[in-house]
Image: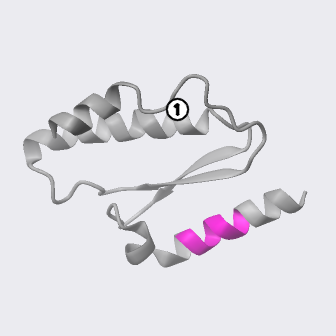
């Protein structure tokens, strides 16, 4: 946990830029179900901050909430992953 906290201080360098690259960030609604209850709020705040910073690196980034999912979105909600891939492909073709 202490190593994770150190990484969360600067999760995305300010110099990281992706222009208009399509990015879809899948945001599970229960990513830390296995974490100790006392750590969940800190983990959730760090996750949301990191996702916002990643989204800010591209003018074509979106954050998509995924209901009924944990950190393993690809297992819990595989359709959300497929939809995200289709979205990126469609944006790339434009």
Q: Is residue 58 above or below residue 93?
A: above
How many labels were placed on the picture?
A: 1
**Does the magenta run of residues contain 7?**
no
Position in image of residue 1 (x %, y %) = 16, 40
Q: Quadrant of the C terminus?
A: bottom right
Q: Is residue 31 above or below residue 43?
A: below
Q: Is residue 87 above or below residue 53?
A: below
Q: Main secondary structure of the magenta part?
A: helix
Q: Quadrant of residue 24?
A: bottom right
Q: Residues within 10 Å of mark 1 (few under 14, many from 20)?
A: some
> Mark 1: which secondary structure?
helix
Residue plotted at (49% across, 32% down): 12
Residue segment shown in magenta: 81-87
Q: Which residue is mark 1?
A: 53
Work out whether residue 46 can be spotted. Answer: yes
- Asked if residue 93 lies left or right of residue 15, the reply is right
Position in image of residue 49 (x %, y %) = 42, 32
Work out whether residue 42 can be spotted. Answer: no
Residue plotted at (33% across, 32% down): 8
Q: Is residue 26 above or below residue 17?
A: below
Q: How is the image coloured?
A: one colour
- Asked if residue 34 lies left or right of residue 88, the reply is left
Residue plotted at (34% across, 25% down): 9
Residue placed most toward the observer, 13 or 50: 13
Position in image of residue 15 (x %, y %) = 61, 24
């Amino acid at each position: 946990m202490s190593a994770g906290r150190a990484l969360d201080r600067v999760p995305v360098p300010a110099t990281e830029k992706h222009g208009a690259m399509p990015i879809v960030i899948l945001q599970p609604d229960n990513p830390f179900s296995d974490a100790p209850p006392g750590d969940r709020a800190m983990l959730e705040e760090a996750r949301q901050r990191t996702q916002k910073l990643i989204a800010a690196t591209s003018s074509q980034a979106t954050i998509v909430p995924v209901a009924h999912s944990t950190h393993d979105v690809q297992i819990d909600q595989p359709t959300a992953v497929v939809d995200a891939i289709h979205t990126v492909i469609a944006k790339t073709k434009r």
